[in-house]
Amino acid sequence: MELTVGQIALIGIIASVLSQAIKLISAKFQKDIGEKVTMVIVFVVSLVLAFIWLNPLIPTMDWSVEGIVMFLIEQIGSVLGFSVVIYTLLLKKLYEKLDLVKARFIGKG
């Protein structure tokens, strides 16, 4: 699971849109959204992107409990694993756009 150049560019665009939306909401309500809310928003966006980009297909399987559980573990594991890659990059780009330094979460560089 690697990000293509187009996906990385799209993540940069999404980070720009999210940063402007966060700034707009903060200005409208005259209150900072907060780090935790920002991280939750980025996590949800990364999950959606991972699901769309991986496009998990439902294979033909036996509909036993074991078959369903194995399918869920495989699909959820791959989507969550890929979303972590997207989350890290998106959060780093978003913090750059918002001029925040959160070295403990995203590292320097």
Image (cartoon, rainbow, N blue to C red):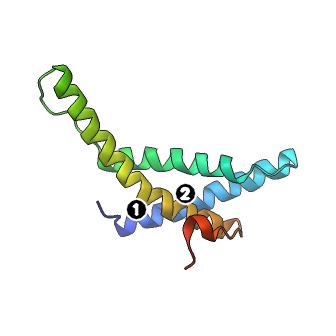
Q: Earlier in the sequence, mark 1 or mark 2?
A: 1
**Residue shown at 68% from the left, 70% from the top:** 101
Q: Is residue 96 above or below residue 77?
A: below
Quadrant where the C terminus sits is bottom right
Question: Any mark on residue 66, and which?
Answer: none
**Residue shown at 70% from the left, 68% from the top:** 100
Residue 14 in picture, x, y percent from top left? 55, 57
Q: Nearer the viewer, residue 87 or 26?
A: 87
Q: CA distance from mark 1 to mark 2?
A: 10 Å
- Which residue position holds label 1? 7
Q: Amino acid at mark 2?
A: Ile
Q: Is residue 101 left or right of residue 108?
A: right
Q: Is residue 70 above or below residue 25?
A: above
Q: Nearer the viewer, residue 68 or 4?
A: 68
Q: Is residue 106 above or below residue 49?
A: below
Question: Any mark on residue 14, and which?
Answer: 2
**Residue shown at 53% from the left, 48% from the top:** 43
**Residue shown at 38% from the left, 47% from the top:** 80
Q: Is residue 25 left or right of residue 87?
A: right
Q: For label 2, count other residues whose C-alpha is less than 10 Å away and answer few (under 14), some (14-19) or many (20+).
A: some
Residue 37 in picture, x, y percent from top left? 67, 46
Q: Amino acid at mark 1?
A: Gln
Q: Nearer the viewer, residue 90 or 13?
A: 90
- Residue found at the far right of this picture: 30
Picture quadrant where residue 85 is located: bottom left
Q: Is residue 79 left or right of residue 10?
A: left
Picture quadrant where residue 62 is located: top left
Identify the secondary structure beneath mark 1: helix
Q: Is residue 60 left or right of residue 33?
A: left
Quadrant where the N terminus sits is bottom left
